């Protein structure tokens, strides 16, 4: 009996007791590891008992029981200490053909995860054995096993093995010539995955550009007898009319991919490709048509779009419009024949998980324009959300939307004749698609649609009363797309009837219409803002009545509509009559929900907006709300600590609860102002904020900095004792890689500076260099630039001696960042700072004085003492250089700037 066999015999006696099974499985592999050198001298073979134990483990891992899965995960982590374990896994995958396929495939996927994490620690013999087994079994009769081996091969190759596995690509290419379909298909599958994961490397000198050999090889297979093989790598034209729809679909997909990455290769053939895609966009197989429709979406993002499609709009527009009709299957899935379903409870699986978006502090601009390149909360998809699959209707609508943005007025001549026919069509499906078309072009063609809107908007408002629920719901969405125009007109013919009908639809008997109307009304609220104040009582009556009417899903959307209303009308909501209508149902929902219920997210967001708007009107409700938020943060932090110490015993916390609680506390601080002080006094909120500021999750830090800034403004008395601890943490978070975290930290530093005054001096060095670096960084988002400029200005205001020497390094981007900000307190303090710094270091602004002049001219109505500061600097500079030089200098000014400075400051 060999030493290893004797050990196994003794071990078998111990294994009779199941309670110690895990320990002994681990011991077993540790014994095998000691004898590993023995195994490497010949081809590796598994021990039967070890093999059985691995199989037991694989079976256990397929259990739906969470505790069992956690135990298996523990065992796997321990077994990974022994490289021999990976030999067993590949053996089960490739050799154990008597086992069921899911178990074999699972063995391969566990091995794939081990390769991803531990491959660099595999002994050479183990790595060699695994690679040989993969290549020898790529043609397994089972498609599942072939696919798993392909995934394993590409995972190994991405660990740097393409360079050190020279036989891989030649071996796979040679196996393409096999007459065995399984070997050919398995090799193609593996090569496809390698091409997807390592495309750049395959076309590099590091591997002598193997694509030069591989592509001609693939070309031979365009006419293979198997549709599956034909569809793996597509011939772009020879297969265009292939009788197999799977092949046509993949031809379209391949063209879309090429359009994304190598448009230069397609340009010579673009006319033929466009004509082909026009045909395929009308393919009888909807999956093919959908893939073809993606082409127009992708092309719209390319600079060549306008040149390529200008001559094809007459053919393309009707194809896209036709694709926007509901198919019969869509109508069935959407229960389009069901008109009244308000009493039917929602299927919980249909409710999308909600994720809270952490608070980002922003400034108001002139014209209130949206910030380019920043995420928007607005979802401009049409209202098929519950039909969550991407389909031809959605793709066609999205394509028309982006093309309207590319072609603008050029699109309308091709569209208007079709549109009129659609909008007044007797068939509701056709009419509905026309309303969708009108919504899809709203953004791109708005300017040229304006002459038609006085007729179209009343027609759409009429459609809100259509007998078909799907027509009513799409009319809600399309009207929301034109809300900006509606609000710009006299209220009686447009805003009032639209608002009246939308509020009726909020109380519709169809849940889909309720949802669309609620979302549309939220958009109208954002556009109309204080225009809605005269109608607040009527609006609140409707929204509050909806509380008693709505099922679960729409209740969550109702919270958004109420929160948006509060944001839009602000302090106008702070009337006893309105508070009495609104607060009881909100507080009732608040009391019904448990701390771990995710419905708290939208409700907390809603309450945050309401608290900010109601200001002192929220005082009667603030104490229990404040206390619960503090408790949510405290519980979440405690759970995170326990999880970090014992991840095997505790679940990781859902930190969204903490984030949303921090944001509501911000809303309370902003709304209640100094009144929040009594609540802060009776809690440990400052300790909790300090912990949140150091959390590993960026969104937690982001919200904690927003709260810190709001508490600094509301009750600095409680913040000041913590400044020495807080400021170094704020300084560490001035990292623009995390834009929103950096933005809120920057804003909080500025608020602290204003409160600290000259006592800020010891802390300036902790933050100033980072702020100057951020303001000079290319492609920094506008909001971050603005907050950085405000904070630099505020630091300069309270500590000019420390900041003024750096004026030449930031004055130009500082001025350009703040020229579009509305007059407000933050802008006021920042400009006072820049004026004080110029007084300390006038030479620091000389090179860029024209930018300072432009920034000064951006003020509409500065306070008198600030205007005097501007006057003195401008005249001081003029006197210093002399009249002639000033005239020469001011000749560079744009006419508007010259006139404004002359009128306001006499220079």
Image (cartoon, grey):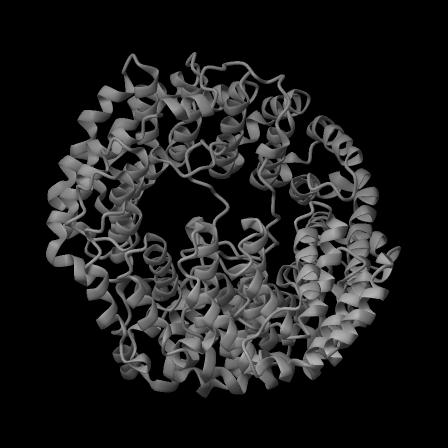
Quadrant assignment, res 204? bottom left
Please indicate whether residue 760 sits to the left or right of residue 239 in the image: right
Between residue 820 and residue 341, name the one nearer to us.
Answer: 341
Task: Spot the residue most to the right.
Answer: 682
Task: Spot the residue most to the front.
Answer: 1
Number of numbered labels in the structure image: 0
Between residue 524 and residue 436, name the one nearer to us.
Answer: 436
Q: Residue 383: x percent and y percent? A: 45, 31
Q: Residue 366: x percent and y percent? A: 43, 53
Quadrant where the image shows the C terminus? bottom left
Q: Answer whether residue 400 is visible to the viewer in this image.
A: no
Residue 682 vertical position relative to residue 89 in the rendered view, above or below:
above
Please indicate whether residue 423 sits to the left or right of residue 763 in the image: left
Q: Residue 479: x percent and y percent? A: 40, 29
Between residue 438 and residue 623, name the one nearer to us.
Answer: 438
Q: Residue 113: x percent and y percent? A: 57, 64
Please indicate whether residue 626 sits to the left or right of residue 612 in the image: right
**Looking at the image, which residue is at 69% across and 78% down?**
33
**Looking at the image, which residue is at 70% across and 52% down?**
60
Residue 810 vertical position relative to residue 533 in the rendered view, above or below:
below
Quadrant where the image shows the N terminus? bottom right
Residue 229 vertical position relative to residue 326 in the rendered view, above or below:
below
Between residue 882 and residue 777, name the one nearer to us.
Answer: 777
**Looking at the image, which residue is at 67% across and 64% down?**
48
Q: Answer whether residue 749 is visible to the viewer in this image.
A: yes
Please indicate whether residue 556 sits to the left or right of residue 333 in the image: right
């Amino acid at each position: 009996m060999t030493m290893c066999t004797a050990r196994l015999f003794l071990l078998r006696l111990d294994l009779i007791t199941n309670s110690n099974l895990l320990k002994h499985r681990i011991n077993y592999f540790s014994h095998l590891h000691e004898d590993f050198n023995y195994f490497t001298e010949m081809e590796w073979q598994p021990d039967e008992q070890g093999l059985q134990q691995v199989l037991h483990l694989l079976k256990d891992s397929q259990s739906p029981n969470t505790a069992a899965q956690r135990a298996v995960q523990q065992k796997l982590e321990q077994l990974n200490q022994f490289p021999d374990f990976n030999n067993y896994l590949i053996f089960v995958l490739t050799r154990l053909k008597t086992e069921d396929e899911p178990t074999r495939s699972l063995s391969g996927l566990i091995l794939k995860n081990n390769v991803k994490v531990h491959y660099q620690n595999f002994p050479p013999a183990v790595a060699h054995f695994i690679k040989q087994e993969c290549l020898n079994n790529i043609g397994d009769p089972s498609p599942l096993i072939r696919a798993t081996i392909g995934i394993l091969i590409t995972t190994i190759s991405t660990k740097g093995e393409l360079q050190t596995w020279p036989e891989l690509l030649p071996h796979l290419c040679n196996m393409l010539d096999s007459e065995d379909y399984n070997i050919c298909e398995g090799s193609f599958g593996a090569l496809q995955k390698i091409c997807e994961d390592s495309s750049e490397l395959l076309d590099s000198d590091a591997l002598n550009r193997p694509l030069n050999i591989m592509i001609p090889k693939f070309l031979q297979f365009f006419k293979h007898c198997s549709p599956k093989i034909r569809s793996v790598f597509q011939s772009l034209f020879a297969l265009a009319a292939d009788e197999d729809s799977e092949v046509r679909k993949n031809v379209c997909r391949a063209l879309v991919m090429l359009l994304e990455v190598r448009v230069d290769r397609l340009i010579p053939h673009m006319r033929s490709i466009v004509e082909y895609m026009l045909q395929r966009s009308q393919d009888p197989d909807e999956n093919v048509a959908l893939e073809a429709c993606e082409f127009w979406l992708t092309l719209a993002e390319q600079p060549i779009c306008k040149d390529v499609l200008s001559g094809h709009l007459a053919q393309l527009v009707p194809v896209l419009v036709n694709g926007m009709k509901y198919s019969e299957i869509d109508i069935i899935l959407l229960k389009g024949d069901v008109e009244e379903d308000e009493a039917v409870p929602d299927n919980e699986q249909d409710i999308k998980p909600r994720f809270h978006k952490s608070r980002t502090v922003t400034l108001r601009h002139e014209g209130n324009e949206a910030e380019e390149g920043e995420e928007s909360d607005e979802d401009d998809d049409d209202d098929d959300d519950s039909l969550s699959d991407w389909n031809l209707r959605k793709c066609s609508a999205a394509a028309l939307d982006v093309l309207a943005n590319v072609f603008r007025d050029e699109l309308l001549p091709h569209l208007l004749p079709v549109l009129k026919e659609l909008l007044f069509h007797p068939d509701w499906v056709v009419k509905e698609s026309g309303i969708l078309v009108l919504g899809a072009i709203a953004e791109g063609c708005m300017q040229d649609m304006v002459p038609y809107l006085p007729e179209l908007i009343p027609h759409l408002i009429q459609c809100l009363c259509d007998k078909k629920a799907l027509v009513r719901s799409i009319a809600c969405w399309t009207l929301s797309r034109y809300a900006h125009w509606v609000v710009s007109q006299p209220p009686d013919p447009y805003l009032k009837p639209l608002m009246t009908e939308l509020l009726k639809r909020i109380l519709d008997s169809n849940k889909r219409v309720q949802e669309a109307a609620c979302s549309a009304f939220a958009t109208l609220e954002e556009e109309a803002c204080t225009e809605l104040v005269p109608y607040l009582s009527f609006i609140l009556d409707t929204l509050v009545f909806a509380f008693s009417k709505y099922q679960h899903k729409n209740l969550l959307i109702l919270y958004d509509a109420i929160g948006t209303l509060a944001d839009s009308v602000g302090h106008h909501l702070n009337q006893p009559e309105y508070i009495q209508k609104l607060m009881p149902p909100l507080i009732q929902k608040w009391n019904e929900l448990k701390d771990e219920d995710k419905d708290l997210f939208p409700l907390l967001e809603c309450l945050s907006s309401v608290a900010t708007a109601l200001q002192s009107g929220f005082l009667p409700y603030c104490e229990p709300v404040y206390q619960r938020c503090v408790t949510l943060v405290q519980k979440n932090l405690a759970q995170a600590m326990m999880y970090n110490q014992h991840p095997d015993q505790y679940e990781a916390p859902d930190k969204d609860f903490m984030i949303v609680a921090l944001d509501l506390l911000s809303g309370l601080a902003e709304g209640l102002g100094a009144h929040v002080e009594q609540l802060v006094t009776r809690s440990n909120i400052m300790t909790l904020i300090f912990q949140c500021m150091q959390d590993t999750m960026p969104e937690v830090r982001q919200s904690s900095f927003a709260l810190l800034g709001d508490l600094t403004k509301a009750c600095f008395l409680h913040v000041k004792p913590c400044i020495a601890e807080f400021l170094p943490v704020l300084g560490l978070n001035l990292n623009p890689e995390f834009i929103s975290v950096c933005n809120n930290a920057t804003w909080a530093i500025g608020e602290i500076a204003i409160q600290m005054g000259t006592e800020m001096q010891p802390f300036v060095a902790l933050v100033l260099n980072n702020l100057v670096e951020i303001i000079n960084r290319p492609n920094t988002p506008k909001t971050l630039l603005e907050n950085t400029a405000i904070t630099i200005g505020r630091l300069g205001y309270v500590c000019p001696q420390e900041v003024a020497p750096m004026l030449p390094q930031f004055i130009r981007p500082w001025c350009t960042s703040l020229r579009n900000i509305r007059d407000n307190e933050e802008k006021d303090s920042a400009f006072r700072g820049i004026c004080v710094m110029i007084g300390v270091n006038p030479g620091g602004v000389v090179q860029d004085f024209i930018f300072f002049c432009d920034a000064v001219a951006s003020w509409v109505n500065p306070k008198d003492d600030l205007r005097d500061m501007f006057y003195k600097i401008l005249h001081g500079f003029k006197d210093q250089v002399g009249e002639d030089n000033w005239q020469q200098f001011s000749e560079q000014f744009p006419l508007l700037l010259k006139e404004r400075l002359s009128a306001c400051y006499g220079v």
